Image (cartoon, helix red, strand yellow):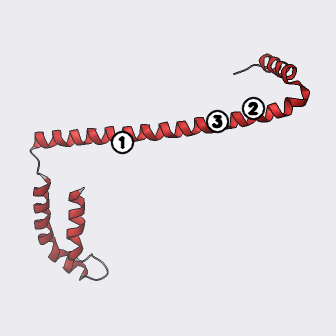
Amino acid sequence: MFGVEEVLLLSVIILVVFGPDKLPEVARVLGRAAKELRKVTSTAQRTWNEISREMELQEAQERARQLEEKRQAEDGSQAPEDLNAGSASFQADSAPAVENAGGGQGGAPDAGCLPEIVNSKTEE
């Protein structure tokens, strides 16, 4: 940034302009100004980083949505309503196995919690 010669030249100019009596006060003011400048730039940098992350997240979500639409168009995949219907038949098929595995105690979850789990996954 500045070399030794530039710093010495600035020091001499400041000493001549303000005098030795005002030099400590000028140094304090300059120090406070530098601190405030660092604080402002730090805040601006944090804000900029947050905005960039939000924009990147929005772009990623948009790309994911476009890829999902493209995949559905190419594969003719099931609509979310069809997935819910499929999860209901899965629940009916798996409920006896779950009840027999843990007897509803200790080991396996009750069959009643399966609809919540499956429906929450399909709603996302």
Residue tagged by mark 2? 30
Asked which secondary structure carries label 1, the reply is helix
Residue extending farthest to the right is 20
Asked which secondary structure carries label 2, the reply is helix
Q: Nearer the viewer, residue 28 or 72?
A: 28
Which residue is pictured at 25% across the width and 55% down the height? Answer: 124
Residue tagged by mark 3? 38
Which residue is pictured at 24% across the width and 62% down the height? Answer: 120
Residue tagged by mark 1? 57
Mark 2: few, some, or many residues within 10 Å (few <14, many ≥20)? few
- Dot label at residue 72: none
Asked if the residues shown at circle 3 and circle 1 are in contact, with their CB atoms under 8 angstroms apart, the answer is: no
Q: Report the side of 91 relative to 105 (left or right).
A: left
> In the rendered structure, which amino acid carries the disc numbered 1?
Leu
Asked which secondary structure carries label 3, the reply is helix
Which residue is pictured at 27% across the width and 38% down the height? Answer: 63
Separation (CA) of disc 2 from disc 3:
12 Å
Q: Earlier in the sequence, mark 3 or mark 1?
A: 3
32 is higher (above) or lower (below) than 123: above
Mark 3: few, some, or many residues within 10 Å (few <14, many ≥20)? few
Q: Earlier in the sequence, mark 1 or mark 2?
A: 2
